[in-house]
Image (tube, helix red, strand yellow):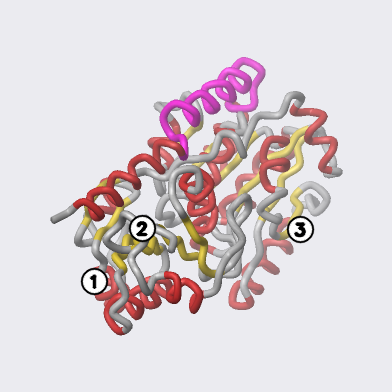
Amino acid sequence: MPELIVTNFNRNFTGVSATAAGVIRQQMQHYDLALAGHPLPGCPDPISKSEARRLSRKAPPNRPFTIWHVRRNTEMRAALWARDVLRLPVKIVFTSAAQRRHSAFPRWLISKMDAVIATTEHAADFVPNVRAVVPHGVDCSYFTPAKNRAAAWAATGHPGTRGIATIGRIRPEKGTDRFVDAMLAYLPDDPDATALVIGRAAKSDQAFLADLKQKIADAGLTERILFPGEIAPDELPTLTRALSAIVQLPRYEGYGMAPLEGMASGVPFVATDAGYYRHFSQNGTTGLIVPEDDAPATAAALTRLLSENHHEKMAKSARRAAETIFSVSAEAQGISKVYEALWTAP
């Protein structure tokens, strides 16, 4: 009987999936753990939802109940069914990153959790039952710097001698259009750079994507702003370490792992003041925060970041901050304290 069941019911690899995977790789060293749902890189082979319920029928050895750690609405619903309908010996922990008010049904679900972990102090303002604020961390053994960045970029097969990327779903909320506008302003002055838009567009955002590609074509930069689509999770570290900069310009972001994964890879970033990006930037030593909807300012920040005087210094600072301040081991330790408090409560 596992003492901990972590759920992953989204078949797509999202930011939530990435954060869960990093923590699970730490937790599997300390807990009898099962992953329920869809596979995650470097994690145990998953079991089904029904198998998770079966394994929760009895309390695990030396524990009063099994903890289900959930991160999505569908997962909260499944855990509540196990606890409240099937009456299984289960307690539910939910991680919340949203920095805005949840809609009515998610608010109700969250109110039924036994413990809530917020990823930031601001996120904690929007949810009840918060037991701890535990920022997401990055797996610094999974995301590592390239020994030779130029060779790593050449190995990707993309043109130019260095790469700049934005990572995430292609949609207005993620600021993909802001990235394109910034690249239209920046690339003419840096003929060695190639820009990548890493991610996919949902059917509802296909017109948005088409407009972006037309704008790029009109500027004559189709061969320098590329859309490689989604990158498989186990391939992402290799591509990330080959980049020279990550640029994230969302209109809204709950937390945002792309800059942090870049930092662990020795890749500094440029970003708007969204998610946890300002904290990641460490007063401009690991990344630069830029105004919203200001392509010239973003291009200027990128020019500064990639300059010979700044880039290598920022790259080293980024890696150091990822290891010492934003490591996934620290996140896992913070989460463990919440588990232990539940298990030992009278």
Residue flagged by tag 3: what amino acid is it? Asp
Q: Secondary structure at mark 2?
A: loop
Quadrant in the picture for residue 154: top right
Looking at the image, is 324 positioned above or below residue 242? above
Q: Secondary structure at mark 1?
A: loop
The residue drawn where x is 30% and y is 84% is 85
Quadrant in the picture for residue 289: top left
Visible in this render: residue 302?
no
For this view, does 327 lie left or right of residue 304?
left
Question: Which of the two discs, 1 and 3, sits closer to the camera?
Answer: 1
Say whether residue 164 is magenta. no
Residue flagged by tag 2: what amino acid is it? Pro
Marks 2 and 3, how far apart in space? 65 Å
For disc 3, the marked residue is 218
In this view, the residue farthest toward the left is 346
Q: Secondary structure at mark 3?
A: helix
The residue drawn where x is 31% and y is 47% is 120
N-terminal label among 1 and 3? 1
Looking at the image, is 342 positioned above or below residue 284? below
For disc 2, the marked residue is 61
Q: Which residues are magenta?
A: 305-328
